[in-house]
Amino acid sequence: MSTTQLPPFSTKALAAPALFFPQYDNPPRYDFDQGMPDPSTYPLEALQACADQVIKTQGQAACGYFGLAGRSEMIYGYAGLRDSIASWVGKRDKLSLDRKNIMLMNGSAAGLSMIANALVGPGDGAIVESTTFPYMASFLESTGATVFRAAVDSEGLVVEDAERCLREMKGQGLVPKLIYTIPTFHVPTGVLMPLARRQQLLDLARCWNVYVVEDNCYNELWYDQPTPPTLLSLEPGGRVIQSDSFSKMLAPGLRTGWVVASPEVASMIGRMRPDLGVSQFTSHVVNAWMANGRLDEHLNRVRPLYRRKRDIAADALRRHCGAFVKFHVPQGGIFFWLELAPGIDGQKVRETLLREGVACRPGERFAGATAENGYLRMSFLQVDEDEIERGVALLGQAFAAAST
């Protein structure tokens, strides 16, 4: 039988999970890997009650492609939840927003993918941080744009280095289009960009006439003091596009995120939607849950728990790992960024941890071609309080065994 020569698969596919996530034969006993909220905080009973309420009161209207607001919900999402998010974000950021500013997404990653495809393409230049959420770097690269990486320090994106990237773009004949940043509890480093640098970054964006994509997923998880104003609140004219999600605040399995943008930019992004919209039913349930201030109540309830877990992890790291790593204690978010001391074999550390059932995210997952194999990202929320100490002790033993 003859065979037909098939064309090769495209290398422009979106990032696959296996590219960034370690693979385990068995679930780790101490999972410091995944960036998720504490599962014990998921408001399961309240969500179940809201789901029952939606079925009883909305019925079929909550189970179709769209509701009373019409077919536009297949692009923008359920209007009721968009209204609720617009009100909540508007109150926080002191902005006048409505549903036209909000587009619902299947998690924030879907929104970032659509933003990338809407705003950049071949011949364009985009900036991400030197270590960053790897999906967005991949999404930008998949458009054909040239992606530059700017340095990160203890206050986040180094604006002077971003300016260097913009000049380099111009020198290469590229059109500067976009700066992507995680200013609040940066991934993976956990650092917080102060107000002065936020203003400096926005001044640069105005000067070069580029968009700023603000990944805001960790903004509400502050433990010591409220965060500085968001970039969106400091530049409300449409230059800043904010991506956010319930994944870190509430529960990741809801897959409910959103983008805040001007109506004009939202329309551009909406043309990139690759599916038939987000789940109407889930959106109805989340909207019912948000009623009567539930989101703020939930955040006020979990912050002390998360702060305590952070402090337990920091103390354990000092005692068990202090001779092997350097780190700062994050003011919020989910992660410690551990810099391994010289002479520690990172690969040997990972092999030891795998045998001991301890999972951490390797630093090179966030750094593109410039592998950060001397770092580990450690999430501290998924592991139970009384288990954090034992898991970190095993981490210290792995460091000791891998030291030369």
Image (cartoon, grey):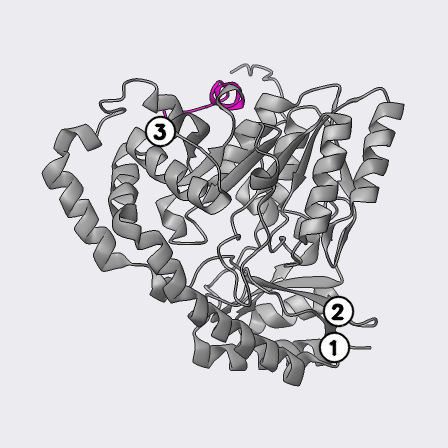
Question: Residue 324: which disc?
Answer: 1
Mark 3–mark 1 CB contact (< 8 Å): no
| Residue 309 in the figure: left or right of residue 278 | right
- Give the amino acid at mark 1: Phe
Q: Quarter-wise, where is residue 33 in the image? A: bottom right
- Give the amino acid at mark 2: Leu
Please provide percent x and percent y for residue 319: 65, 85
Q: Which sits in the foreground, 309 or 203?
A: 203
Residue at 48% over, 18% down:
271
Q: Which residues are magenta?
A: 265-278
Q: Taking 215 as reference, is 145 above or below it? A: above
Q: CA distance from mark 3 to mark 2?
A: 44 Å
The residue carrying pointer 1 sits among few (fewer than 14), some (14 to 19) or many (20 or more) residues within 10 Å by Cα, namely: many
| Residue 110 in the figure: left or right of residue 44 | right
| Residue 177 in the figure: left or right of residue 73 | right
Q: Taking 223 as reference, is 101 above or below it? A: above
The residue carrying pointer 3 sits among few (fewer than 14), some (14 to 19) or many (20 or more) residues within 10 Å by Cα, namely: many
Q: Which residue is mark 2?
A: 340
Helix, strand or loop for disc 3 = loop
- The mark that comes first in sequence, 3 or 2, is 3
Q: Residue furthest bottom?
A: 319
**Front tag of 3 and 2:** 3
